Image (cartoon, rainbow, N blue to C red):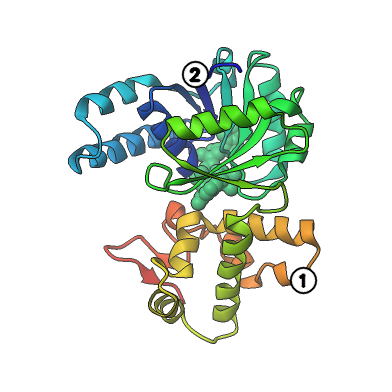
């Protein structure tokens, strides 16, 4: 099996910076790529901020933080991936965006390199089919926030070979994460269950059954969820939630997965949740304020 020492991560948003963070702390060399230089600057700040918090909580040592920070390089050019052993794609949840990235990656990364997608919902088999190495392609679905969440959902495409699967298990072990295997069907396990619940919460709001706050309170105290569905949706990103519902709706052709029009409206307004400072809550002030 090809050894993985150097990992390239495409997309330096919420997930990409978290993946870079945990890989660097586990001793991998990491190149973090984004087409937006601003996203790269923000990612560097976020990683530093999050590692500093881990140091202050005695979860990691300052020396480990310093060496991990020095193992991450930042690049706006995919050409910097010429020596990676594994490329993990964590760009926007849009199939055409991801396919273009994988096509470009095939022309850059070495022949032996594995390819992985952190997609929340899109078919691994379909993404793999645009590459020159579908047998070396796998779904590695990290959870948000990556440094905190224990799970990686591992999804094999139709062509993924055993060696690539074992590479994924080895990576998860070195990152000290737990694996759940999922078959390659729309949204896999976690989001097949979670995101329709969020969508149903938006319908509950849309139909006036409750307000953002009453629905969040009801689900926190009534179902013992650590976060209400709107807090969670804002945390995930409403564009990502909508994309996942569209993948479920298209892929399973069942009307129960119809995205709520109110969710569509928030996304169209650019109110994407925490990352854009406004979603079902407004985060621009001291404390979040419900928008409905
Ligand atoms: P995000 O919007 O925070 O970040 C996406 C980043 O990708 C942006 O910085 C954008 O500039 C960059 N990007 C877009 N096109 C690119 C390209 N062609 N080349 C390089 N960079 C590009 O999104 P996110 O929440 O980090 O989600 C990223 C992926 O992770 C998605 O597939 C999403 O479904 C998945 N995911 C998200 C969560 C979550 O809770 N947010 C959890 C698990 C998996």
Residue 110 in the image: state x and y as whole percent. Answer: 64, 13
Look at the picture and state if 189 lies above or below 228.
above
The kind of secondary structure element at disc 1 is helix
Point out the quarter of the image occupied by ligand 1.
Answer: top right
Closer to viewer: mark 1 or mark 2: 2
Look at the picture and state if 283 lies above or below 164.
below
* Quadrant containing the N terminus in the rendered view: top right
Residue 284 in the image: state x and y as whole percent. Answer: 35, 60
- In this image, 69 relative to 30: left or right? left
Q: Earlier in the sequence, mark 1 or mark 2?
A: 2
- In this image, 106 relative to 202: left or right? right
Tell me where residue 207 sits by quadrant. bottom right
Q: How crowded is mark 1: few (under 14 residues within 10 Å), some or many (20 or more)?
A: few
List the residue tagged with mark 1.
Answer: 255
Tell me where residue 256 sits by quadrant. bottom right
Residue 6's disc number: 2
**What residue is drawn where x is 78% and y is 67%?**
254
What is the distance, in whole Å, between disc 1 and disc 2 at their CAs? 43 Å
**What residue is drawn where x is 57% and y is 80%?**
204
- In this image, 241 relative to 233: left or right? right
Q: Does the residue labelled 1 lie within 8 Å of ligand 1?
A: no
**What residue is drawn where x is 72% and y is 35%?**
99
Q: Is mark 2 within 8 Å of ligand 1?
A: no
Residues under numbered marks 1 and 2 in contact, where contact means CB atoms less than 8 Å apart: no
Tell me where residue 285 sits by quadrant. bottom left
Q: How crowded is mark 2: few (under 14 residues within 10 Å), some or many (20 or more)?
A: many
The kind of secondary structure element at disc 2 is strand
């Amino acid at each position: 099996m090809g050894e993985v020492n150097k990992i390239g991560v495409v997309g330096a948003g919420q997930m990409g910076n978290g993946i870079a963070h945990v890989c660097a702390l586990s001793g991998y060399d990491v190149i973090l790529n984004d087409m937006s230089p601003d996203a790269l600057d923000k990612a560097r700040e976020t990683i530093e901020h999050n590692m500093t918090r881990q140091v202050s909580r005695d979860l990691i040592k300052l020396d480990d933080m310093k060496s991990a920070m020095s193992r991450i390089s930042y690049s706006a050019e995919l050409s910097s991936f010429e020596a990676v052993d594994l490329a993990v794609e964590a760009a926007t949840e849009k199939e055409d965006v991801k396919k273009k990235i994988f096509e470009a990656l095939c022309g850059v990364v070495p022949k032996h390199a594995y390819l992985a997608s952190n997609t929340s919902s899109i078919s691994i088999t379909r993404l793999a089919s645009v590459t020159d190495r579908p047998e070396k392609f796998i779904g590695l679905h990290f959870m948000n926030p990556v440094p905190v969440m224990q799970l990686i959902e591992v999804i094999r495409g139709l062509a993924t070979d055993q060696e690539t699967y074992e590479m994924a298990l080895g990576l998860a072990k070195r990152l000290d994460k737990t694996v759940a295997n999922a078959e390659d069907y729309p949204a896999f396990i976690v989001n097949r269950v979670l995101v329709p619940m969020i969508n149903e919460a938006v319908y509950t709001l849309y139909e006036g059954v409750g307000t953002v706050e009453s629905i969040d309170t009801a689900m926190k105290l009534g179902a013992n969820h650590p976060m209400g569905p709107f807090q969670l949706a804002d945390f995930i990103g409403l564009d990502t939630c909508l994309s996942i519902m569209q993948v479920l709706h298209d892929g399973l052709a069942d009307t129960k997965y119809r995205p709520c029009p109110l969710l569509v409206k928030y996304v169209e307004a650019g109110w994407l949740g925490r990352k854009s400072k406004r979603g079902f809550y407004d985060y621009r002030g001291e404390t979040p304020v419900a928008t409905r």
